[in-house]
Amino acid sequence: MTRVLELDAVSGGYGDTEILHGINLHVDAGEVVVVIGPNGAGKSTAMKAVFGLLNLTAGEVRLDGQNITNTPPSDVVKQGVCYVPQTNNIFANLTVEENLEMGAFVRNDDYRPQLEKIYQMFPPLREKRNQAAGDLSGGQRQMVAMGKALMLEPKILLLDEPTAGLSPKYRGEIFATVRQINAAGVPILMVEQNAKQALGIADRGYVLVDGSNSVQGTGQELLSDPKVGELFLGGGRA
Amino acid sequence: MYALYDFINFHFIPGLVLGSIYALGAIGVTLTFGILRFANFAHGESMTLGAYFAWSIITLTGWHPMAALPIAMVLTAIVSIGIDRGFYKPFRAAPTIMLVIASFGMMLMVRSAIQFSWGVQLKSLQSGIQQPLILFDAIRISPKHLIIFGAAVLLMVIVHLILSRTKMGKAMRAMSDSPELAKLTGIDTEQVIRNTWIIGGALAGAAGILLAYDTHVETMMGFQVLLPTFAAAILGGIGKPYGAMIGGLIIGLAEELATYPWIGDTPLVSPGYKAGVAFVIMIGILLWRPSGIMRGRTF
Amino acid sequence: MDALYGYSLYFISLLTMGGIYAVLCLGLNVQWGFAGLFNAGIGGFFAIGAYVTALLTTAPSARHIGGFEINTLVAYGLSMLAAGLVAWGVGKVCLRLRSDYLAIATIGAAEVVRLIFKNETDYTNGPRGVSAIPKPFETLPEPWNHIAFLVIVLIAVAIAFWALQIAQRAPWGRVMTAIRENEPAVRAAGKDVEQFRMEGFVLGAMLMGLAGAFMAQYLKFVDPNLSDPLTATFLVWVMLVVGGSANNKGAVIGAVLIWTLWSASEIVTGRLPDEWAVRTAYARIFLIGLMLQVFLQKYPLGIFPEQRPRPPRSSRESA
């Protein structure tokens, strides 16, 4: 298995406040990896650590074996990591197609074939290509956000709670979309609140508690782990 | 019937002309406000600078003001980038209010530099009186006004094409939408900022030249139109170039129409308060719809 | 001896103007230093204060309303009140929006104030201004009349300074600091942030109005140009930034220091041949602008940085 992304004993936070205390996790080629945990456990922060949005004080982030610790976001993008934030992840005033074009900003080659692929993957986007992205439904906006990230044909896609604030119907659609993207060969690291559904589609999962690793295993292992069930899958639903 | 022609000749046409000048200025204000997140108080002085550059070019070469316009626009854009490098760039990571203070200082610096270099006497871009064109025996349009309006509309069409058709123009709109997401997307934000200053500076220069062509070249001219320009940008919606165009036309028309004798024989607003019209409209929009016509950003 | 006497008079006038600017600068310090509000129309509040005192204290005149000849101290109070009321109105519109809007609105308000003083000729004598404004103790023999007025200004500076020192350390001042540091936390603690901002904005404007009242008396003359963005607004900003925002001592010393520089450089440029005198006067503005930029970039805290008891560690953690 090729290791695409690896966080090796990463510590860091904002300013003086340390939020991550030596996190380890990795994503191998072709995997969907889900990070779950209670609120404030540092899930989203771990993702931002990959993307150079955090000041890391210890440990290493490696992409394809290369050290990318504390690389600024603009360079991380160029190296093939795409990040979809939880909120504010589309340019609302730009049309759908313009959003996708912006996703390809750092490309200097012809991105048309990739645009075509994305329209094939998300047919509703082709239909609404000339509408302002801000006018779309919640689920379709997530499609725009993911499509925009895929324009770079990234080595890995980072998704920060893609189903937050969506109705259960749309949630299912998003998880299906995640699988679909993964099936096209893109490894995915995803932070999720809806742990049960997320683990259902995950190859592996990590549980973070208080900025440290707690439990890890395959999606099925975590789903059947009584400790995890008690913590997140039962009463812990937001 | 005379009243109607007077209305058109002395209020409506001058209002459109002034409005088109405000519109050009307001596009730059709204782009810098949207992309760099601050109200640029030195924007009016960029207009003044453009007018003086044009005056120098005309004096040296004897060209028509419209021939000097593109060169003066380029020069103003270059100065705008230089000011950004020296005085705004150090504050990229600082609270944006620092930029407002810096631009406030820049306003006085640029103006005093102009006063130092060119003196404070009134100057004209073109001497002599032109015969107005007469339509339907009663509507009089001075050729100058036609040229100004035409040039302003042409420039706005060019801005529209840049913003909607080019990669950089789209990136500018994207960054105006969300600077954070623009960074995460890998958009070269410094390049976008540079282009914002180029477009904003060039348009400000153009606005100054057109204003000077309509009236005269004067060191306070930019400061005098700063408030209407801001009002136009806010009215149109911050970060919305198309809103700024509409806002500029509305403010220009409002200023000229406010002095029309709507009730009785005396002007509705005494000409001495013309400059206050933009302020009143701005306060109104801040009270009732701070996001402006085009639903721009409010902070 | 004559030369020495001349220098002494110059020194007195320097201190008087420095004192008036110190009141302005303390006013701006409340607005910007304490409350973090950008006022780009200081000159407007200053001119309001000046005109209120001018019109209320002068003898009857055919050129403007007047003849009230009210007591100087009452006039000071009314000048402050008028400036404060206008500030309240502007604040009502803008304080809920981002600071840039306040900056734009204040520069506009100052312009409208100037238009009113210029156009309402029947009341204000328009551009020709109001003259023969009584000045306290002006009947005393020279130089005592100048000294007496200086003392009045210095007393006002002292009172304003002392009151602001207390206010800054009081719970009110600490909430102000907290708002600038971490507004959401203050909101979460149930404080009415807009109310605090409004108080800071109005209080600062009142001080600016008082400075205007002094100016009217000192010059014995007011005209619409008192609201000039350069001398009435820009210089005050330079003073506060150079002196040190959020530090009352910085505001006062910055005011005196910059005024001295400004006034002394005027003497130098005034002695140059005419052709150069006009031009160098603009070079002077350019240089003082450059000084502002240098301080903003290299010494943003000013000569006297803000003094503040270090907040306890735990309260920083939550930030």
Image (spheres, coloured by chain):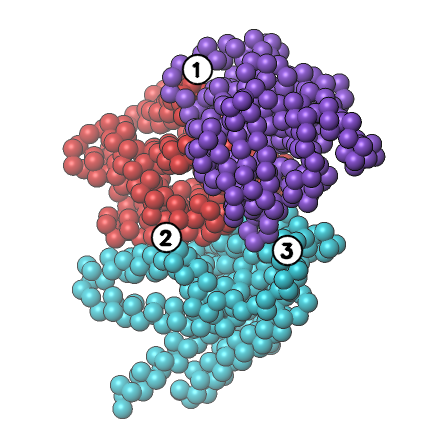
Chain colours: A purple, B red, C cyan
Camera-side residue of C312 and C169? C312
Marks 3 & 1 on one chain: no
Question: Marks 1 and 3: in contact by CB < 8 Å?
Answer: no
The amino acid type found where label 1 is placed reads: Tyr
The residue marked by circle 2 belongs to what chain?
A: B
- For discs 2 and 1, the disc positioned in front in the rendered view: 1
Tell me which residue sits at (50%, 9%) in the image.
A116
Marks 2 & 1 on one chain: no
Q: CA distance from mark 2 to mark 1?
A: 47 Å
Farthest residue in the bottom direction? C1
The amino acid type found where label 2 is placed reads: Leu
> Can residue B4 be seen?
no
Rendering coords of residue A210 (x, y %): 68, 45
**Crowding at mark 2 (Cα within 10 Å: few <14, some 14-19, many 20+):** many
Tell me which residue sits at (52%, 43%) in the image.
A59
User: Residue under circle 3?
Assistant: C317
Farthest residue in the front direction? A1
Residue B102: assigned label: none
The amino acid type found where label 3 is placed reads: Glu
SS assignment at label 3: helix
Camera-side residue of C290 and C148? C290
Tell me which residue sits at (35%, 34%) in the image.
B198
The residue marked by circle 1 belongs to what chain?
A: A
Camera-side residue of B15 and B29? B29
Rendering coords of residue C92 (x, y %): 65, 50
> Can residue C166 be seen?
yes
User: Residue under circle 1?
Assistant: A111
- For discs 3 and 2, the disc positioned in front in the rendered view: 3
